[in-house]
Structures are given as C-alpha cells and as structure tokens.
Amino acid sequence: MSEHDLTAAYAVDALTPEEALRAEQHLAGCATCRAELAELREVLADAIAPATPSPAMRERVFAALDDVEQLPPAPSVDETRPDESRPEPPGRPKPEGSPDELSLRRDRRLAQGRSQGRSQGRSQGRPGGRRWLPAVAAAAAAVLVAGAALSGWAALRWREEAQHAQEVALAIAQVASAPDAVTVVAQNDGAQWASTHVMASAELGEAVIMPTGVSEAPRGHDWQLWWVTGSSARPAGLLSGGTPEVLEGAPDGATAVAVTLEPAGGSSAPTTTPVAVYPLGA
Amino acid sequence: MTGEGASRGDAPGDALAAAMARVALGDRDAFAEVYDAMAPKVLGVTRAVLRNPSLAEEVAQEVMVELWRQAGRFDPSAGSVGAWAATIAHRRAVDRVRSVRAREDREDRVAAGENRTAYDEVSEQVLQHDDETRVRAALGGLTELQRETVLLAYWGGRTSTEISQRLGVPVPTVKTRLRDGLARLRADMSRQDADLPGPTAAGAPSGRSERSQRSVRRTT
C-alpha cells in the first residue's frame, strides 16, 4: 500500500497519528493527493445530513466570541508570495501541509495520547482550568504581534512559530476543558519555578506546562521536561524560555512531571537534580 | 448546483467565502451569516459521530467558535467553507468520541457481540434515520464491505486499526476498502450533482467504473 492510498483514510480521520503524519508529509509534496483530499472533503461534507441546532447553542457560541483571540488574517504582503504556506489550488506545488492539517495534528496527538487503563478514581471535580486561556491567548498573540513587522523569510519563520503557539494554545484549551483537568504547583518551589504550573488531564493523557518568570536556560543548555514514574524518567520535550509547552508523549502512569537543566538539545535521562517537580497523583 | 471538483463555484458558496473573509476581521454580522449556513452542517457531523445529542451540540458549539477563531486561515482556493467546517467538526467529534470510548472501554471490557452492535447502530442511524436520500443512494452504490468500512470510519469515528479488529480483516484491506468506497461515493455523488443518468461523472469513461466496481465486489 503506497502513501497515495492513505489519502482516503486520512480524509475520514481513520489513521493513527503516526500514519496521519506520514500522510501529511506525502500530501505536502503530492498535488494529486491534495486535489483528491479536497474533493473527498467536499463529498463527505455533502454526505452529512444537517441537523437543527438549538437557539441556545447560537447564544452560547456568540457569547463565547468575546473570549476568543482570533487568528489574524495572513498579512497581505504574503498573499502573493510563491512560498506562501497557505494551501494553494490543486495542481500547484506547495512546500507545507495546509494549515488545517498542521493545526489539527495536535488534535490527533491528543487523541492518541490518551492513556490506557489509567485510574479514573483520582479525577478531580474541578471544572477545567479555563482561567489559563487568556494567558495562553496572550502568549500566542505576543508571537503574532512580534511577527507582524516581519517580511520574507522572517515572516515564514514567524508563521511557523505562530503555528506552534497556535497548536499549543489549542492543546491547552483541550486539556483545560477536560473534566478531570488538574493544575499542580511545584513541590520544591525553587525561586523562579514557584509561579510555574503544570496542568494535566489523565483522561486525555496530556499535560501542559505554563512557565511564569522562568529565565532562558544558560547558554549551551536547555530546560528539559520529564515524565517521572517511580525512580525512572522519560523525556517529555524541551521548554523554550517562558512559552507554554505541551509535554511530549503520554503520561502512561507517570506520577510526576519534572524539569531539569540539560545540555542543549536535551538528554535521554536526567543528568542534574530537578529544579521543579510536579506531582500528578491526587 | 453543479459539483465541479474541489471548489464548487456556486454563488452561495462564493458569498459564504466572502463572509469568511469578513469574519477573519472580526465582523460579527458576517459570522452570523456563516453561523446560520454552517451550524446545521457542523451539528450534523458531530451528531453523526457522537450520537449523544447534548454532547454533539457541545462539540458543535466548540467547532463554531473555532471557525470564528481560525477564519483568517480559511483559504477559498483550497475548498468550500462547508468542507472546511465539516473537516474541523469531524476531527473534533472523532477526538471526543475516542476519548469517551477509551473511558468506556476501560470501565467495561468489550463484549463479544459488540462488533455487530456498533455497526448496526451506525448503519441504522445513517441509512434509516438519515433523511438525505442522496446519501442513502450514494452509500447504496457501495459494496456491503465498503459501506460497512466507510460507515465505521466516517460516521463511527473508528480508526482503520479498530475497524480491522472489529471486522477481522487486515489493516491494508480496511484502507483499500476506504479508498475504493470513497472513490465510489465521490463518483456517485458527483453524478447526482450533475444529474446524469449514467455512471459518467468525475471523468470516468462510461462502463469502466461499473466494471471496476464489480471487480471490487468480488475481491474484497
């Protein structure tokens, strides 16, 4: 089965996150499959019978708009750029997957990250951590504002960063709205980690870290995140300065999230004492 | 309405795409237009996948807010507003249904007879309670195996791995059935759009698609 054959399964969201990634990589370079995907999406959209939403839903949606930071339209200078990363008409090559694919990768990872067989017993009754959303939106907006003055390759770079911020914001929103979302503070609140929180949902199998007042790691080093289970630790990605980040991988029974200072690029196992530990158990 | 590939150039679609451009600038009147046109479709998608009406509406609500948020990213050259909205809605709904299912599976191990039940439920909902006759007609053109697979995937929110386990066939077979089934669905629906009597839609020479359809029926 060739990569071309993944398009249909991709169109109906039937791929595992790994396969979806492969499909997206293929789609980015295959105009035929992009055109096919576009057509299948039209067909599938057509194939669904509409339902009548309640008037209450309309009210709730419009009420929610005030709290939502809209993504800015693509800068007009970019509209005609050949290396624009926005999707292009079928038949024309483009360098990137279309934005919706990129942004939705996060959804897939979330879907996949759900841990199997985790105890539900310690679910907290706290209604999701929605208070984080303004902070996250602000962080994403800061990236966007910073990029607004750029052009050319810098604009493309900015777009990538904005995209990432966007993905993180979406993931955070999902964790925050999980019924079992918990927010934990550092056990050993070393000075600059005291205000940094981790929000986790066992149900989603996801955790996000919200750094506040955290400085950049010293030159040649990175802050690295870890899933801690008993005395072992699995890498959970790097933290870049003060930006919120989604932890990589699934908790898989992890009892804590830890942060250590590691040589640039991270280590496969912690080489220093954690600067902050966030217990995940209730 | 004429369905001509990815971007259906009908006037309502153009008006909607224009409205999206204004939504991207924070225009609520334009969003009201998009809402009225898209909310029923979005709810249709989430209800198809999630079935629980209140959960479906909750997810549809999130999706509509997403449309507002991501309006700046909508690209009319990449497809219609409807396809864009349905794609986002389907991903969201699938994400949610898999979450709910993971919890249910943990609490209550899969019963032996569930395969049949899951498919019957989906099938019944789509084919009997779905008032879109054209959908029924289009799905009716699929082989039983293709229909089952497409229904479990798009309407049931199952991964190809899950479908493989449920139907007891290898994953590549599931993907092949999806590919062939969706190709068939596309051909049938564009034929309906074009309102032609024969299987000549989507550029397929008359007779050829019928033949390949029969061979699919034999081999899968």
Image (spheres, coloured by chain):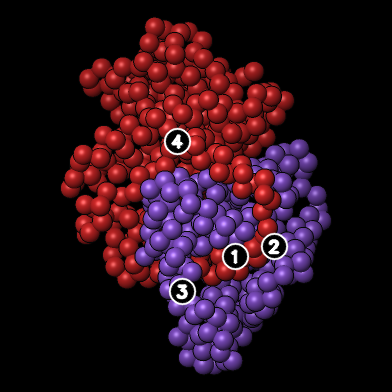
Same chain under badges 4 and 1? The reply is: no
Q: Amino acid at mark 4?
A: Ala
Same chain under badges 4 and 3? The reply is: no
| Element under disc 2 | helix
Question: Is residue A116 left or right of B14 when viewed as pictured?
Answer: right
Query: Residue B10: which disc?
Result: 3
Question: Disc 3 vs disc 2: which is toward the camera?
Answer: 3
Q: Position of residue A177 (x, y in %)?
A: 59, 34
Q: Residue at x 33, y 40 (%)?
A: A162
Q: Which residue is mark 1?
A: B174
Q: Is residue B111 visible?
A: yes
Q: Residue at x 42, y 46 (%)?
A: B26
Measured Cα–Cα span from mark 2 to mark 1: 9 Å
Write down the chain letter for disc 2. Answer: B
Q: Position of residue A112 (x, y in %)?
A: 55, 43
Q: Which residue is mark 4?
A: A169
Q: Residues within 10 Å of mark 3 (few under 14, many from 20)?
A: few
| Element under disc 4 | helix
Question: Which chain is drawn using purple?
Answer: B
Q: Which residue is mark 2?
A: B167
Measured Cα–Cα span from mark 3 to mark 2: 40 Å
Q: Residues within 10 Å of mark 4 (few under 14, many from 20)?
A: many
Q: Is residue A4 visible?
A: no
Q: Amino acid at mark 2?
A: Leu
Q: Residue at x 36, y 65 (%)?
A: B77
| Element under disc 1 | helix
Same chain under badges 2 and 1? The reply is: yes
Measured Cα–Cα span from mark 1 to mark 3: 34 Å
Q: Decide: marks 1, 3 in contact (CB < 8 A)?
A: no
Q: Decide: marks 2, 1 in contact (CB < 8 A)?
A: yes
Q: Position of residue A233 (x, y in %)?
A: 48, 23
Question: Which chain is drawn using red?
Answer: A
